[in-house]
Amino acid sequence: QKEVEQDPGPLSVPEGAIVSLNCTYSNSAFQYFMWYRQYSRKGPELLMYTYSSGNKEDGRFTAQVDKSSKYISLFIRDSQPSDSATYLCAMSPSGSARQLTFGSGTQLTVLP
Amino acid sequence: KAGVTQTPRYLIKTRGQQVTLSCSPISGHRSVSWYQQTPGQGLQFLFEYFSETQRNKGNFPGRFSGRQFSNSRSEMNVSTLELGDSALYLCASSEDGRAYEQYFGPGTRLTVT
């Protein structure tokens, strides 16, 4: 079993919809939680990061971490066609914060 | 500031050969990490360098190695290439004290035939 599980999708939603992306993990040592967006033939782009549990909001994006359930989420409000990409969750322990373990990615398409 | 740059962008090699990939981090970033991305295994951590020292290494065979220079530029080398080494190799850089904020380059697409 992988340390980080992510539903690969694909996920297709109409423009303006609220999108929910999720990951579960098994390693209790993970303290840093990140969400990356990757467009085709590009490197991943950091969207948000959270340390330990809690919520964080940045514009249309909200990240939630529930360490008791080992579950993290990314919500995208008012989704746009430009949000169409693969979304990757990533996490790392505090002692090796740069050693990221990634989920497999969820492919999102926002239809105009 | 310029982003992370990786050269070459595309590479085709034959089984048994070796290859060297290069990464130039964002100016001022002293940490460079390398990742392998394949359709089957996704993104996997290879190693991390900081101030010319390898700090962490992922679960890859010894054929995969790397180094970092005094100007923070990094190279990774793969010897005795296998078909399964075909992948997108990504490097990421980050500032001191902001380990959670890694910036990725566009990657080098390696094809082994």
Image (cartoon, grey):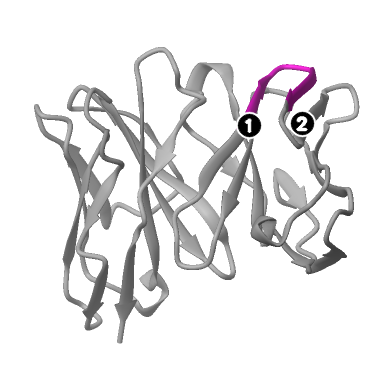
Q: Which mark is residue A63?
A: 2
Which chain does the residue under circle 1 lie in?
A
Q: Is residue A111 left or right of residue A82?
A: right
Measured as percent of width and height from the top left, residue A87 is found at 67, 52
A111 and A43: which is toward the camera:
A111
Q: Is residue A53 left or right of residue B86?
A: right
Location of residue B97 with respect to B12 vertically, above or below: above
Measured as percent of width and height from the top left, residue A12 is found at 83, 68
Q: Identify which residue is drawn at 48% across, 33% down.
A: A99
Q: Is there a contact, CB below 8 Å, between mark 1 and mark 2?
A: yes
Which chain does the residue under circle 2 lie in?
A
Q: Is residue A21 left or right of residue B82?
A: right
Location of residue A79 with respect to B92 vertically, above or below: below
Q: Residue furthest top?
A: B97
| Label 1 sits on residue | A48
Q: Is residue A105 visible?
A: no
Decide: few, some or many residues near mark 2? Use Cα within 10 Å; few <14, some 14-19, many ≥20. Answer: many
The picture quadrant where one finds residue A10 is bottom right
**Secondary structure mostly seen in the magenta stretch:** strand
Q: Secondary structure at mark 2?
A: strand
Measured as percent of width and height from the top left, residue A54 is found at 81, 17
CA separation in Å, label 1 and label 2: 7 Å
Amino acid at pointer 2:
Ala
Q: Indicate whether residue A55 is drawn in magenta.
A: yes
Q: Is residue A82 visible?
A: yes
Location of residue A112 with respect to B99 vertically, above or below: below
Location of residue A84 with respect to B31 vertically, above or below: below
- Please state the extent of the stretch shown in magenta in the rendering: A48-57
Q: Identify which residue is drawn at 71% across, 45% down.
A: A4
